[in-house]
Image (spheres, helix red, strand yellow):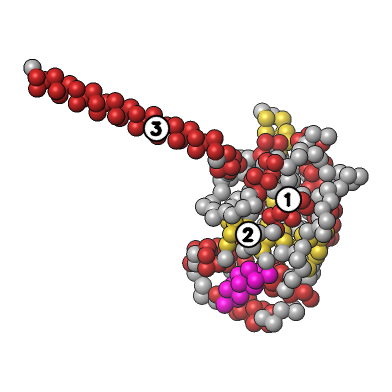
Amino acid sequence: MAKQSKLSFNSKARITAALLTALTIGSLLDLNFFTRPESHARRFLQAEDAAPPPPAAASTSIKEPNAARLIKAAPATAPDSTRRLQTPSKPIMSTFFEPVAGGCCGMTEEGHQNLVTAWRRAWELYGWDTRILTENDAKKHPRFEELSQKLVESDVNGYNQRCFWRWLAMSLDNNPNGGWMSDYDFFPLRLTSAIGKELGAAKGFKSWSVHVPTLIHADQASWNKITNMMVDTIDKDLDVDYMSDMYMLEYLYNHHSEEELGISTWERLIYPGFTYVKDGTNVKMDCAGAMSRLGAHLSHMDTHKAVDNGLFPKVPGCVEGDLHSCMNRRSDAANVMLKQFREVCFRI
């Protein structure tokens, strides 16, 4: 009986200790939850979804300032033509455009020009200065001829050669308000000049669309590092899916550490395509997804999906379901989308 009583006491003691441990861990977890709201906000912003909101982020090594945090803290006030968001020494958003004679990629040369014009107006509305880089800017780089020769040997077409040239042009950017580059089919949603100024203050190479060079900021040393690594690595026998700057950036990321590449931000905070979703048979603005993203990338692939899924804005000259006619009206569609986004999703 004495032995049985002792065993019962020990069992109770173990149970009591286990409960106390569980309660302590639970308290710590609850404390961690309430003291680290940014990490939970990031997981929400990066939630995976087959349709918009956009897909989850890849693994990151993000240093402050945090883009998701800045978006969440920013006032939900729509920029407009009479109330432009201003900051002292406005940041400069650059893009690269060198026309391909006769057009390319499903668009006429005029269609590309119109898209560049829409891109410039959109960024200036958000308080940015803009700059359009060309082949002449890239030719100022001492490795231009070397890169061009490697691209010819690798049978890279004219459009993708231009995509590589922009890296040369950006690596020469020594403007303290510069360092920003986006595709000219990338349009701002929450990336105001104020947020851009703060994000640009951090050192290192920063991409908000992982290996897709849709939106990048880097200081000049970081631009030079990645650009030189690209030029050094390009080879006609390189094991990549396709020789483009996108696949080259992915190759570098897969074969080097983030520390070796000087990466300080590598995440996905871009809305893929037009910011609309289906609600039954109706189409509506996806405010939840769009308001949590820096901008929208109206890429060729995402435009194709929008046309197929009935999510391309109704604009003159675009025949419903006809990809070619709609692709050439991306500039008009971008203007319509941004106007509706400001009217529907912001507090006026």
Mark 2 = which residue?
206
**Helix, strand or loop at mark 1:** helix
Q: Is residue 124 left or right of residue 2?
A: right
Mark 3 and mark 2: span between their CA atoms? 39 Å
Q: Amino acid at mark 1?
A: Ile
* Type of amino acid at the residue the image marks with label 3: Thr
Cα–Cα span, label 3 and label 1:
39 Å
Q: Quadrant of the C terminus?
A: top right
Q: CA distance from mark 2 to mark 1?
A: 14 Å
Which is more foreground, mark 3 or mark 1? 3
Looking at the picture, how far across and down is residue 243, in whole percent? Answer: 59, 68
Q: Earlier in the sequence, mark 3 or mark 2?
A: 3
Residue at the spot 54% in from the left edge and 55% down from the top edge: 61
Circle 3 crowding by C-alpha within 10 Å: few under 14, some 14–19, many from 20: few
Residue 276 or residue 133, whichever sits in front: 133
- What residue does disc 3 label? 24
Q: Secondary structure at mark 2?
A: strand
